[in-house]
Structure formats: structure tokens, C-alpha cells
Image (tube, helix red, strand yellow):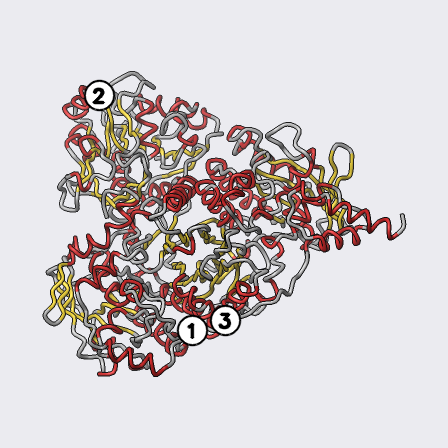
Amino acid sequence: MTTTSFESEIDAYIAGLSRYGVALSAAEIRRIAHTLGRLPSETELYAFDAQWSEHCSYKSSRHHLRRLPTDGPTVMQGPAEDAGILHLGEWQGERYGIVIAHESHNHPSQVVPFEGAATGIGGIVRDVLCMGAQVIAVADPLRFGRLEDAHCRYVAQGVVDGIAAYGNAIGVPNIGGDVYIDESFDDNVLVNVVALGLVKESEIIHSKAPKGSVGWDIVLVGKATDRSGFGGASFSSVTLDEDDAEANKGAVQVPDPFLKNVIIRASYRVFEELRAHGIEAGFKDLGAGGMAGCTLELVSSGGYGAIVDLDKAPTGQPNLPPAVIAIGETQERLAWVVPPSFTPELLRIYNEEFSLPEISRGACAAVIGVVTEEPFYVARFAGEEVMRVPTRFLTDGVRYNRPYTIALPDVEPFADFDARTRDRRVAKLDRATVENILAHRDVCSRAPIYTRFDSVVRGTTAIPAGEADAGVIVPIPGAPLAVALSVDGNPRYGAIDAMRAAELAVCESARNVAAVGARPVGMTDCLNFGDPTDPKHLGEFVAAVDGLAYAARRLGTPFVSGNVSLYNQSKAGRAISPSPIVACVGTIPNIAKSATFAIKRSGSAVHFVGMPQPNFGGSVYADICGFTSANLPTVDYDEVAREIDLMIEAFDEGVVLAAHDISDGGAITALCEMAFASLDRNRAGFQVDTSAFPDKHAHDEAIFYGEAGGFIVEVTDSTAFARLADRHRVFAPLIARTTDDATLRYNDLAFDLFDLRETWAAPLRDFYAEARV
Amino acid sequence: MSVAVMVFPGTNSEDETLRAVKAAGLDGRLVHWSADPASVRGFDAYILPGGFAYEDRIRAGAVAAHDRLMDVVIEGAQSGKLVLGICNGAQVLLETGLVPGTGPIRRPTAAFAPNGNGGRFRSVRVYARPVGARARSPFLAALGDAPIPMWASHGDGRLVASHAELQTIESGGHIAFVYSDEAGITSDAVIPNGSALGVAGLVNARGNVLAIMPHPERDGWVFQHRDGPEKLAAMNDGDAMLAPSGGSVIFSAFAQAMNAGVR
């Protein structure tokens, strides 16, 4: 064949591609054909489509992500594999790590909310499991469209139902998460999910074929392959509109938490056996890109190749084409690389001891291939070779350095800002404003959502969702070591300035774990943005990465894992608010040095930690007052770090009774929530007094409604706490004393806290038709 | 004294239940569904933990009640061995007919049906107060009067039965626990699921088979408690924070009854 005829053959192939529904560009197809020296087979075409999708290859984002700090003394493993690992502590001579992974399931959840959200949990749990870890917790950051809209309501309810149905059944506690409601999510719901695992450092399993594994078996475990989830990876990398939604439903996977429950437990048994016999193995979850994508990455990261027989993969439907078996994203599957001597035991555990074939039709563990020296991924089907591709070519994919523009936020000139601030000094705390804040969609009680999730299964939960700023678990029975997890990312900030929003998300998540006495040790991020081929949206992404990177460096909290979700945009062009969402892991050496945010006693001193700022950009206060401002809170990293150090030391010294971070809705929200949690038991109330604030900060607006961060802290001993604050050079004036009359009093104001609690509890309770707080 | 903690496909609370059993000084072991029934007969007592056994197909607990290992459990219950079902385990026990035990085996006379909120799963802190049935059950007699803190975490916990059966349950002393507040007062506000008569747990006539919907093992250590004097006192004291407490009395009463030779 002459070059010209090959070129025209490629052109003809590209022209006929529309019927395959792949997202590969013409240039990408040409590159594939030139490297292979031939046109790709149908199976290869879909394999490239999946592996080179934005979802799998991070082709527009990867070089930006390199700016994130990923290393530090707390890091056991950085972002190389499905999940990162942070150091928890030592117990009985073993070093323990906390595995963390963070994913999005935005596109599927928009199309079929229940299944989309459920399979999001399913996928993240496998990412953690395949590190050899026990899965110990999950948390969901959710971003819903306006609940006044019928379709948004359907999505918001389906997502919560899906998370409940899946997460509750597999037996992993859901210890946190957050919910924001914003019109920018009307066409694109965000369903992120974070999972934590526990692993001894000596027992980490890697997602790669071990050294010297040529000739080892590749074993596929789980649900029988079917047509569900075919095309999922590339589906996640396109923009959505209503017409596509129906057509895309086939790309969404079908969840089976019942089977997953059993696979998790069977895999724990396999871990035990591997450890007992000192056998090394590779283990990886099947996610985007299906069986070929998973086994390809397993062998490729070990520097090997594979020969896989697609006929040997258990199938749940007859006559599946090889491309579906290779690339389809049927849920509840994992792949092992094990020495042949261990294979019979592996098969026995899954197929007999845990009887997978009896749990779900066609489910089992089956040998499907072998690791090879030659770095090619070869797949055979019905006696024919349907795939032969250099592994690195397929895994490394393509890179794009797309153009972007970073718009500077529209900050008010200082003179205007100052004048307006001066005018507003007269705005005092008042009942109507407080009620409006507490009833605001981003402040009101989330109990109707989190009580749908099991936050206490496994019996290790010390602080479940809703009782503090972070969920806390005690993962090793008998050991005092504890882990705190918080997720953050405010879309109202993102809409104003993606970079500052990212910085504030890092600071708030770090503060949230410090509010339960935990030291922030590391983070993950899920970067949810619009179309990266639009320079404006890519600019928002780049700015957010810069913000995350800078903040994480300054606070010493590396990013050990993460995820990018682009194309969160309807074809009408409506993109989501830039949404860098951050999860922070904190560690507590002794669970007895932690606390919920509920007020504990009457007569305690309550301090305000931090510096109030009159910057109301993106605040709940601005939203309810109906003014716009682009002035987001500013960040003084030294101050943030000192505040966190103060909190941890104060917990350690036993001075803290309760702490709540100041964020959405400001300090007044924090105070109210601390009282609400303690109303029934203690009739907690406050006598508030701002006279300890120096004059320049002594205006109600900044103190009570500002969202610049900091903490409200109930302490055992005001003098001791003030002394600690001085030592850390932190501004921490007394703001209140606790009372027992269920009333918040300030000057001549007196708010009944039972009434305010009802205002705060009602909005979502009514939406989710729940009966109680 | 050996206790089998039964694991069916879909069970999810076996590890923490086993920990609670061991903390009560018992020799607890997990027994999987694939175990040989003969090897399961030797246990002195059985506990059915929470979860979604067999995916709760048909009805919560319905399929597990027909598992071949349940033949062994039913046999043991009939011979007087102690059997405790928690949450999904309680649903299974009602499906076996062992509890309340007013009808034949595997012909349930009552059920824990979908919650009154439209069958939605709900996970909330509750108190379960031991009530009247204690006289004939040494297991229950070992409990005090105080409401016991637990978690209700279920979608199907609302006791339903015919009017006549509910009367039998009440007059026959089959109510083992009712939901209450911390002071022991029952009102609609503290019943998390609309359960008839506020029932949180039922017991058979002989007093050896107990079904409770809320989870004592999820509030069985000080660190799991809600804020209150006991947790506050344990602040800054690691050993106190990790000590058994609250819901753990269910397991210590179970151990006490076993050691007293109740069969």
C-alpha cells in the first residue's frame, strides 16, 4: 500500500466514523493509524476512545495538575495509583495509612440520578479496596440545581436515594459531605464522592503487575459483563443536553451493592491469604475503560504486556461483541494479577467460600489472560486477534496544551469599597436577617439528607455527619487513633474568582478538621469545570489549580489523589460555577481529645478565633440582602496556620469543649448551630458581648455575617485559652458566655433558639418530606 | 461459651457485632453462609447481625429466614438456646416466626415493615427502654430499667400485625423494648419509623429469642455516645473514651444469661 492510499483510507475511515459514536478527533485517529501502521479494529477504536478520553487521560488538564504539591512527611503514597495514602499513626508496632480517593459521577447522575449516584459510590469504594485496604468511610459533596425546578428536584431526590441505597447496603459509613444549591447546577448536577480506607503500610497492594510477574494469571472478578456502561468514559467527556440524555442512558452503569458487599468481604479474605503466605499481587478496579483499560494499566505500570482472551470473560448476555467485553463498564468488577500457584485459592475464595455465582447470575472470578514480557496489549476473541497495541501508546494517550484566559475578578475599587463598608457599619444584628440566613438554601439543616445515609455502620464512628464540621472515625478497634474527614468548595465563591475559591476551599477544609481537634495531613481534589476547549473555562480551571497549589503549599497539606471532571456544561452553553472541591483528612492521636460542636455546659466562655473581615463577596449575607460584591474574603496563610495550631494545642490541653468553624452564614450561624445541637439536652443559649473586639472590628456585620473564616470555641477556661491564643499570636476575643435559657441575647435583642432552630430545620425537611430534625 | 455471629450475603454489621460479643467476654465467631450446617450446631447461642441479607428480596429478612443455616438456628432456639437478632437479624427472626412466636415456624404473624416516612431508610440516635417482658427472660432481666442508647438505622422497622396479633403481642408480654427519650418517655416524636405501640424489640414466650430493630453495637462504647455527662467526663481520657458503655449492656446481659446456663 502506498502512503497516499493509506492516507485516503484513513480519511475514508474518519468520514465513516460518526456511526461509532466515538469522541476521538480526526487528528487523534490519524495518530493512531500512523502508529499502528493500519486502521484500528473496532475493539481498538473503542479502547483508544476510552483511554484517550478526558476522563481517563486528563489530556487537557494533566500538565496543569503537575503544579499541585504531592509530597510531604505525611504522605505514604502520592497520586500515582487509584488512591493516595496518608500516614495515620502507629499502633502495636505497625504503621497505619489512610487511603483516600475522590471521584465525580456528575454526568451519569444528571441522566439517571439514582444509578449515577449509586455507581459513583461503587467506583470509589473499589479504588480504595484495591490498595489492599479496608473501606472505612465515604462522604459526598453534592451540588444541586434550584429545587424550585421540577427536574432539579427529581435529580436531587434521585441522587440522595441512590447514595442511600448503595452506601447503606455495602456497609461503609457515610460520615460527611456537603450540599450547595445553585442555579449553575440546573443542567449539571455535581455528585462527587470521597472514600477512605485503612491499611497497614506493610500490607499495601499496588495497582500494578509486580516485578517478575511474566506468566502470572490475570483474573477478572465480579459481575458478568453486559452491555450496561458501554461508552462511559467518553460519555463523561462530552457536554450534555436534554436530547442526548435519553441516548446516553445506556452509558450509565447498573449498580449492584448486594454483590459489592460480598466482593468486598471476599477480597478482605484474599488479602488475609496473600499476607499469610507472603505473596505479592497486583489488584485494580475496573472503572472507566472497562476490562481492557484496567488490565492494560495493571500490566503497563509494571512495564509488561498482556494477552487476554475475551471469550474467557464471564458474560451476562449472549452474543456480546468483543468491543463491549473489552471496554464496557459493567459495574462491580476488579482484576488481579497473581502467581499461578495462588490462582486456585483465589478462585476458591470468590467462587466457593463467598459463592459469587450464587449471589448474582454469572458473577465469578475467572482467569482471562496472562502477563507477558512484550509490552503489547493483545486481546483475542473467537480465535482472532482483535487488539494488538503498544501498551504505552495506549496508556500515555495524548496531551493538549489548550489556550486559556484567566479573567481577573471584578473587585471593587478600594475607595468605593471602603465607603460602602463605612455606611454599612450601622447594619446591626437583627432578627429578620438571622432568620433569612438560617433558612438560606446553603445554610439550613442538612439532616433530612444525611439521616438517609448510614453514618455508623462498622461501629467505628465517633462523630457522625451533622454533629461537627468533620466526621470522625476510630478505625482501629481498641486504638485511640482517629481520622477526621471534611469536604468543601463554595460555588458562590467559584462564580466570582476560581483561584480564591480554591484557596478558600483548602483553608476551610483544613479548618473543619481542626475544629474537631485533628491535624490536617493531606487532601484530595475534584475539579469540576466546564468545557476545556473554551479558553474561559480552561482559564478558570488553571486558576483554581494555582489556588489549590498555593494554599496547599502554604498549609503543608499535599494533594495525594484527585479527579478532574470537565464538560460540565449543557449544549446551550450554560456551564457550572467553577467548582474546585477539596477533601481534607485530619488525624487525631487520641480520640479523647476531640469534640462535637454542640455546646457542652452553661456558663462557659465562648471565643471568636480569627479576624472578622467586611468582605461579603459570595456570602450568604450578600445573597439574602440582594447586593453583589466581588470582594471575597482574603487569606492570610500565616494567620490560618496559627489558628489551626492554636485549635489543636487547645484540644490537646483539654481546654476546648466545642468548636465550630465560621463559614457559610458567618459566626451567627456557627453560634446558632452550636446551640441547636444542645437545645434539647441543655437548653443552651448565649449572652453575646462584642466589647472585646477592638473598635475597627466592632461592627456587627463583619463579626456576625462575615465569612472570612476562623472558629467559634467553647472553652473550659477563658484565661488559659486566651494565654494560648497570645502565644500563637492569634486574635481570639471573648464573644459570649453560654446560658441555659435557650435564648441568644445581645444588647437588647433576645432570640428564642427553639424558634430559630425550626426556621433552620424546615426548608430541606419539607423538601425531603422528613418528620424530625 | 461460644456464640455464632451469622453472616449471610448482604449482612454488613458482623464485625462490630462480633467486637461487642467479645467485649462481653464471650467466645464469638463469624459463621459464613457457605459453612457446613453440622459445624454450626455446636454453638451455644446465635446472633443475627444487621445488614441486607439476600438483598432483602421479597421482604426484609424473608429469604434469609429460609437459608439452610437458619434451620440450625431455629432448631437451637427451639431447644432453648439464646438467639438475638439485631436490625436485619430482627427482621429475619420475625420472618422465621420465632418471634413473637405466636404462630408456626416460617409463618410470620408480624413484620418489621417499611418505615412510616414512605419506606425511606433513616439513621438516627434513639433510646430503647426495656419493658414488661423481663420477668420470664433472664436475658432481659439482666438489663436495668434505664433506656439504652442505640442507633435506629433502617428502612423497614415499623412493626405491623393484625389488630388481634398486636393485642396478643402486648398482653402476652412480647414487647421487649419500646422507643423512648432519655428519660424513658415514649411519644410519637421519638419513634423513628411509626412502629406500632412504639415497639423497638420483641421477645418470644420462652424469653430466649429476642429481636431488636435499633443497633446497640453502634452506641456500645463511650466514644460512640451522643454528648452528655458520660462522654464529657471521658474527654481527655483515652481509656475511658474507648470503654464499653450504653448499648454494650445488651451483650453483657446476653453473656450473663448464657453463663447462668439459660437454654
Residue lying furthest right: A2
| Of the pair A486 and A423, the residue shown nearer to us | A423
- Mark linked to residue A410: 1
Kindly identify the residue that appears in the image at 54 percent across and 55 percent down. Answer: A567
Q: Look at label 3 and name its amino acid.
A: Ala
Kindly identify the residue that appears in the image at 71 percent across and 37 percent down. Answer: A309
Q: Is residue B221 left or right of residue A526?
A: left
Q: Looking at the image, do the residues carrying marks 2 and 1 touch, with CB atoms under 8 Å apart?
A: no
Classify mark 3: helix, strand or loop. Answer: loop
Q: What is the x, y in percent for residue B204?
A: 24, 25
Subunit ID for the residue under disc 3 = A
Cα distance between the residues tagged 2 and 3: 68 Å
Kindly identify the residue that appears in the image at 42 percent across and 34 percent down. Answer: B7
Task: State the residue position of label 3.
Answer: A407
For discs 2 and 3, the disc positioned in front in the rendered view: 3
Specify few, some or many for label 1: CA neighbours under 10 Å numbering under 14, 14-19, or 20 or more.
few
Q: Is residue A73 visible?
A: no
Task: State the residue position of label 2.
Answer: B162
Q: Looking at the image, do the residues carrying marks 1 and 3 touch, with CB atoms under 8 Å apart?
A: no
Subunit ID for the residue under disc 1 = A
Q: Look at label 2 and name its amino acid.
A: Ser
Q: What is the x, y in percent for residue A560?
A: 52, 62
Say above or below: A558 vs B83. below
Classify mark 1: helix, strand or loop. Answer: loop
Same chain for mark 2 and mark 3? The answer is no
Number of numbered discs visible in the structure rendering? 3
Q: What is the x, y in percent for residue A454?
A: 35, 45
Q: Look at label 1 and name its amino acid.
A: Asp
Say above or below: A614 vs A208. below
